[in-house]
Image: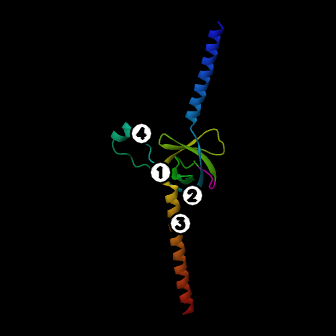
Amino acid sequence: MTMFAEARRCLKIWIFLVLCAGSVAWAGVYQHGTIVRMRMGDCLPAHHGFITTFGGPASNLPADSCPEYTLISEKVVYVIVGRSSTQLVPLADVIDFRLRNNEMAVRIDDAKHETKFGIKEMILRSEWDLIQRHIAEQLSTSLRTTENNMGLRTRE
């Protein structure tokens, strides 16, 4: 009888561990990122499968504006789009996110629920930094040229 009880106890522990591991895998591993830019843009189209594909031409509905955020993580920069105009995230805020089912699930300030965003663009962080540096150099060159031209005009 004790051998049966011991086996039953081991089975319960094993089932408990499997359930715990399953819930951790379902929750996913969160990454951290910082929101650096926000603008209002067009909402991403919703995909509804067979009906949308074969249902004929879509009606011309007025386009809603949805928030579009630039999220910088350690290795990748994402441009994500909310599903409605009410999905607002504070700028310069560090958020937790994970990729799930071709979208991004975002958790802000240890909230109990996740907010889902569509992914519009992705670029490697190293390439994004290089592009930003190039833009800054172009702006500074343009500013110096403008200042030199203004200086020549005032001397005349």
Q: Quadrant of residue 58?
A: top left
**Residue at 60% across / 50% down in the picture?**
89
Q: Nearer the viewer, mark 3 or mark 1?
A: 3
Q: CA distance from mark 3 to mark 4?
A: 40 Å
Identify the residue position indicated by label 1 in the image: 120
Whether 53 is drawn above or below 62: the answer is: above
Q: Which amino acid, by three-letter code, is at mark 4?
A: His
Q: CA distance from mark 4 to mark 2?
A: 30 Å
Q: Nearer the viewer, mark 1 or mark 4?
A: 1
Which of the two residues, 112 or 63, is positioned nearer the viewer here? 112
Which of the two residues, 110 or 23, is positioned nearer the viewer here? 23
Q: Is residue 72 magenta?
A: no
Label placed on residue 37: 2
Query: Answer yes or no: do the residues labelled 3 and 2 have beta carbons within 8 Å?
Result: no
Q: Nearer the viewer, mark 3 or mark 4?
A: 3
Identify the residue position indicated by label 4 in the image: 48
Secondary structure beneath disc 3?
helix
Q: Position of residue 154 (x, y in %)?
A: 57, 89
Q: CA distance from mark 3 to mark 2?
A: 16 Å
Of label 4 and label 2, which has the lower sequence position?
2
Label placed on residue 133: 3
Residue at the limit of the structure toward the bottom, as seen here: 156
Whether 54 is drawn above or below 152: the answer is: above
Q: CA distance from mark 1 to mark 2?
A: 14 Å
Part of the protein shown in magenta = 88-92
Of label 3 and label 2, which has the lower sequence position?
2
Q: Quadrant of residue 136?
A: bottom right
